[in-house]
Amino acid sequence: MRSIAPAILGIALGAGASYAHANRTEAVEQVVGTLTCVTRPELSIVFGRSPFADCAFIAERGDVRQAYQAVLRASDPTLQVEAVQKIVWRVRTRDGSSRPAMLQGAFRAVTDPADRNRSIFAGQFADLEIVSHSRRSINAFARGAARIDLAAVDN
């Protein structure tokens, strides 16, 4: 019974985050910083097909720096990571503010209705717009990665 409780809590938190994101109506427009991730192929091999990455968020104003661990959930099996890849995102929020651990949680790939060539991963408090990818075209990466899960790391 004790092992079921964490699973139920995880499902409830995930559902709540999805509900909050689905009901968000405000546009996420203000750039607050950059998230840079470098994949770790050795962890992807050990833990399965989902690529792992070490990430760093740096605020535009330089007042916030936060380390994250990421898991890239693929909808495309060719997203497997066999070599180190560097992915850079522009981080946008509605209110233009940044704070520690604000990127924690799930980000889902969405199509920007205003610009179909813009690759966005939408989260509860911020959106990530892909700026560059070292090994793939931005659009190919966005089509292959359905979700990115970020967890803040204590500095």
Image (cartoon, rainbow, N blue to C red):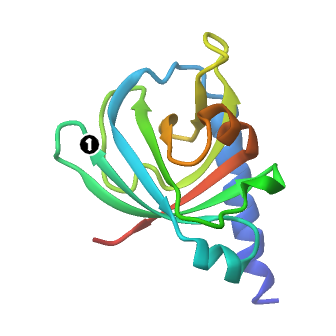
Where, by quadrant of the figure, is residue 88 drawn? top left
Where, by quadrant of the figure, is residue 9 drawn? bottom right
**Camera-side residue: 23 or 153?**
153
Where, by quadrant of the figure, is residue 44 drawn? bottom right
Q: Residue at horizontal 81%, vertical 49%?
A: 75
* Residue denoted by label 1: 59
Q: Residue at horizontal 77%, vertical 87%?
A: 3
Q: Is residue 48 above or below residue 89?
A: below
Q: Residue at horizontal 75%, vertical 79%?
A: 5
Count neighbours of disc 1 (C-alpha within 10 A) and say few if under 14, some if 14 to 19, many if 20 or more: many
Q: Amino acid at mark 1?
A: Ala
Residue 52, given in percent of the width and then of the height, sits at: 59, 67
* Quadrant in which the N terminus is drawn: bottom right
Residue 80, given in percent of the width and then of the height, sits at: 72, 61
* Quadrant in which the C terminus is drawn: bottom left
Q: Residue at horizontal 76%, vertical 68%?
A: 49
